[in-house]
Structures are given as C-alpha cells and as structure tokens.
Image (cartoon, helix red, strand yellow):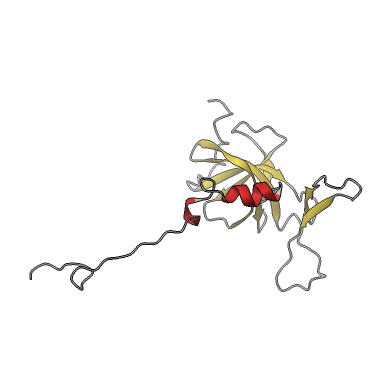
Amino acid sequence: MLSDNTPAPAEPPVYRPNEILLYGVKLNAGCTFADIPFDPGVASDRPGIVLRLQAHKAEDPPAARPLGDEQVSFIVAYGYGFEGSCYRFDRPRLLFLAPAVASRKAEGCGFDESYEMWRITSKTMLLDVSIATGLAEELILAANLPGNRLPNTYGNHMELAHRGGRLNRGGGS
C-alpha cells in the first residue's frame, strides 16, 4: 500500500479500535508557550503582535509558572488517520491537549518526518481553538450574508397545531 493514503500501523501488541492518529506540528516544543503571530500590516512602524498561549492550573496564582510542554501540548493539526483511512482538515486546526500526549515522528498519510503524530483515542479531551485572520469586512460582514452562514443560525421555529383540543389522536373513540 502507498504511505500517502495509509495511516501508521498499530503499535504491537495492543490494537485500539478507537485510536485516532493526529498529524501536525507541536508549537510549544521545549517551551511553556505557543506564539501565533498577528501582523495586520497596517502600520509597519509598529512591532509585530503575537497571541501567546500558556496553560496554568486553575488553582495556581496568576504569577505562577505556566505548565511545560511535558504537561500540555499546543499543536497545529493538518490531518488524521482513523480506521485505516487518512483525512485532511479543510484548514489547519489549533488543538490543545492536556495532559500532553507523547508524540513521535510522523509515518503514513503522506506526512514526512518533519511532522509529528500523536496517538489519541476518540475519548481524549481536546480544546479546538478557532483562529481566523482577515479584514472585518470578510470575517464578520461577508460571513453573515445569506448562503454563507451555517444552517443553524437561521431563525427556525415550529408550531404544533392541536387536533380537537388534543395533540394526538388516541385509538378507540
């Protein structure tokens, strides 16, 4: 089989039928943070801006040291393998895994060794951070034009009409 459409094999001696292989890049490798650059290019005289992601335990004071890369993982995922098939995300997904899941060099699904892969199960808790950059005209106005919105954002309602004072007709009389 070709490695560009086959995920990595299971790790013997255990086969996990609900295993998902995530393929991507770890942003906080060797760090306690992950930076996402935001450079609107409007004013070139200002320094660049970054969104810095850090994780802390809820009970720690605000000045406490953030959790390290061995405790949490910020990853940019480009695709995944599940049940012997490979899939690509429509755009890169920023995922937060806590506790951190050990990664290894990617194999299968067409990803070379510059990528990493994580073996998780379908019950692994994730935080999917949606990030989109662009002009307000595109991100807010154009995204909300009819035809571009998700179907669940349209106003829907349903009314039940009663039948002779009853919502349903029973059998018999």
Looking at the image, which residue is at 72% across and 35% down? 114
Considering every residue shown, the one lying at the far left of the view is: 173
Task: Identify the image quadrant of residue 124.
Answer: bottom right
- Residue 101 appears in the picture as rendered: no
Task: Identify the image quadrant of residue 67.
Answer: bottom right
Looking at the image, which residue is at 50% across and 47% down? 16
Q: Nearer the viewer, residue 94 or 151?
A: 151
Looking at the image, which residue is at 66% across and 37% down? 106
Looking at the image, which residue is at 72% across and 74% down? 59
Q: Nearer the viewer, residue 62 or 21?
A: 62
Considering every residue shown, the one lying at the far top of the view is: 2
Q: Nearer the viewer, residue 24 or 46?
A: 46
Percent from the top left, x then y, of residue 91? Answer: 62, 41
Q: How many marks?
A: 0
- Residue 153 appears in the picture as rendered: yes
Q: Is residue 110 left or right of residue 36?
A: left
Percent from the top left, x then y, of residue 112? Answer: 68, 32
Q: Is residue 113 left or right of residue 10?
A: right
Query: Which corner quadrant holds the C terminus?
Result: bottom left
161 lies above or below 69: below
Percent from the top left, x then y, of residue 131? Answer: 67, 50
